[in-house]
Amino acid sequence: MKKQLSSLLASIALLATLIASLLPLSAQAVEYNTGWLSNPQHPPVEVRYMLTGQSDPQASTVEALLEVRLDTGWKTYWRSPGEGGVAPSIDWDLSNNLENVDWHWPMPKRYEFLGVETLGYKEHIVFPMTLHVEDMSKPVFLSGKLTMSSCTNICVLTDYELTLDFTPSKLSASQEAMHLYNQGMSQVPKQSSVISLDQISWDAGSRTLSVVATNSQGWQQPDVFIDGSSQQAMDSSFRTPSIRIDGNQLIAQLEVTSWFGTPDLLNQTLNATISDNDIAVEIPGLVTDLPIPVNSSASLLEVIAIALLGGLILNVMPCVLPVLGMKLSTVISAKTLQQRQIRTQFLASAAGILVSFWLLAGFLIVLKLSGQTLGWGVQFQSPYFIAAMVLITGLFAANMFSLFEIRLSSNTNTWLASRGDSSYAGHFIQGMFATLLATPCSAPFLGTAVAFALGADIITLIAIFTALAIGMAAPWLVIAAFPTVARLLPKPGPWMNKLKTLFGFMMLATSLWLLSLMANFFSLWLVSGIGVVLVIALLWRLGNVKGRKPVILTLAFLLFGTAGSLILGSVTADQWAKPLRADHAWQPLDTKQIAQAVNQGKTVFVDVTADWCITCKANKVGVLLQDPVYSELDEDNIVLMRGDWTRPSDYVTGYLQSNGRFGVPFNIVYGPSAPQGIPLPVILSSEEVIQAIKSAGGQE
């Protein structure tokens, strides 16, 4: 009997233990799970909210998830839904002891319907979430209103009430919820040491966002999604990217649309979500206006060849003409020298050009590393640089007039004589100066080479600038290689002094032109006063050294030169008696206005120029103010915009760089048939301008 009683008591105890062990699981199923919720008016969608039971007391967080089931054909949306749809959201305002909730978004897919692209999910999706609790020792009451949009060929916006009570310190793990949570987190993009975001660049003119990323393991089938938390980003839709793969580098270009016109994405922080086979990363990046790296399908050797040609052409550009006198003076003086001296002098000039280009490269590298303005000729935006050039050209002019000489001691002269010609340093400086004065020009092929250089690494930049230097120094190098060329010139005689004086006047004219550029930075009266003082000093020194007659000739040159320049400023080179028309009324450059004008069916002609750019002025006088271009630009459907780069301008610089340009002149035509724009060559021609206007306007 006692044995039977003992067996009965043991059975009761075992049953009680089993019941007690099941009670927490039963409580958990009720307490940590809302169960499946649906709206009777929209049965294709079911949702449930679950806690995994995992918590972090130190971080005061609890892990949870939202599970969604959709019938076949229905979809819901990512946090950035694309061109249509509404992202799901939960309003937790009625909750207690809840600070905030982090929503983890799995990688979306692209869906297109009737030309509208959306981003989202179909069938079954798990959204992992992290609850931030105010006090982990106190109960938490979750009261959330889930608003979810679901679509097929129609869209339905549905609300679901989510309620849960729990105490964080008393949670226990749910195997089902943990499995679903981990499944969802495996689809959420994360940071990765394999993929890096190199650059995000915004081109407002073409409404294109460019993303550059590197995968150290190489790319297979990547896709790129962009979104952001700023109002400008949320109002924008980022279309399917055009992706180019170059080795381990990815360059994606996304068209950006917005109901509110052209968005201002510059300096915004955007999220780049990148997927590729089994990897997905999300990396934030600051949007800049820096140019994207140039497609390296053009090899470095090809670009170096282009740079050599661009440097060579730079010798015959309009802005190089003021230093023509120095070049010719070098050649003429070489007539009386020995071959070795000729070769050494011209090599010294070539070395000066090379060093000058290296200094320019170093200057641009410093700007690049510090995030400052990059561009060809940007030093002419500095009044201090221009002032230095005024002084140097004035000294060169005075030297050609033989108004001063540097006297050395007899010992120094003996030392120099024993080691060769004493003018090598002068030739070196002459080469450097010729380069600095030539940089306001943007020659054909030069822009391509400079754009590639500034978008590449530092070593490549130096290599390309070296090629530019060798191209520009080619005439000197040819004479250095074949010194007998210099001996083909006429024999020395009195004509050399007269020609040297002519070159002096050319340098003097260059000084006055440079001085006129100072009026962009200082008052006209101040600049005029400085000019008068310098001219008086020159005339006084000229009178002391040469006498009265050269003073009279110089005054005549200045007076007639000024009058002549005024005449040349109002007539063309081929129609001397016909005054130029008044310039058009140009609007300031505004990329937003460009897009609006094009949407209205108008054609927009953009001219980016600078007062110190001689090629710009040549384009203006020779093409823009001449028929048939002048009359074409005067039509009612043409909108004229001008960007002034005379002074530093981040806006104009960004616009240039967004078009892959780093110097002026730059002209481009937009229209209904060319919303991305038709860039024009550096040196304009009437035929090319008219053709671009017609093509952009859809007339051909």
Image: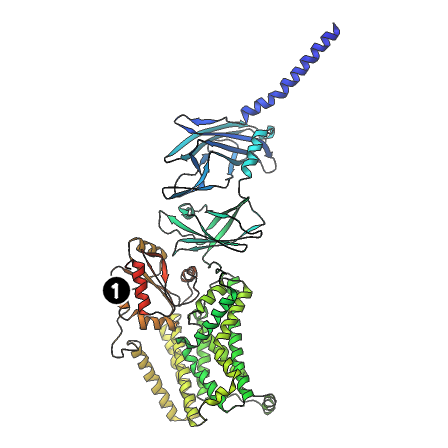
Establish if 216 lies above or below 189. below
Q: Secondary structure at mark 1?
A: loop
Indicate the position of residue 553 as horizontal and vertical percent values. Answer: 36, 89
Establish if 406 lies above or below 447. below
Q: Quadrant of the N terminus?
A: top right
User: What residue is drawn where x is 46% and y is 73%?
Assistant: 311
User: What residue is drawn where x is 53% and y is 51%?
Assistant: 219
What amino acid does circle 1 point to?
Answer: Asp
Indicate the position of residue 367 as horizontal and vertical percent values. Answer: 50, 64
Total label count?
1
Looking at the image, which is closer to me, 444 or 327?
444
Residue receiving disc 1: 634
The answer to whether residue 368 of the structure is visible from this angle is yes
Looking at the image, which is closer to me, 268 or 194?
194
Indicate the position of residue 536 as horizontal and vertical percent values. Answer: 39, 85
Q: Quadrant of the C terminus?
A: bottom left
Establish if 582 lies above or below 210. below
Looking at the image, which is closer to me, 43 or 233?
43
Q: Residues within 10 Å of mark 1 (few under 14, many from 20)?
A: few
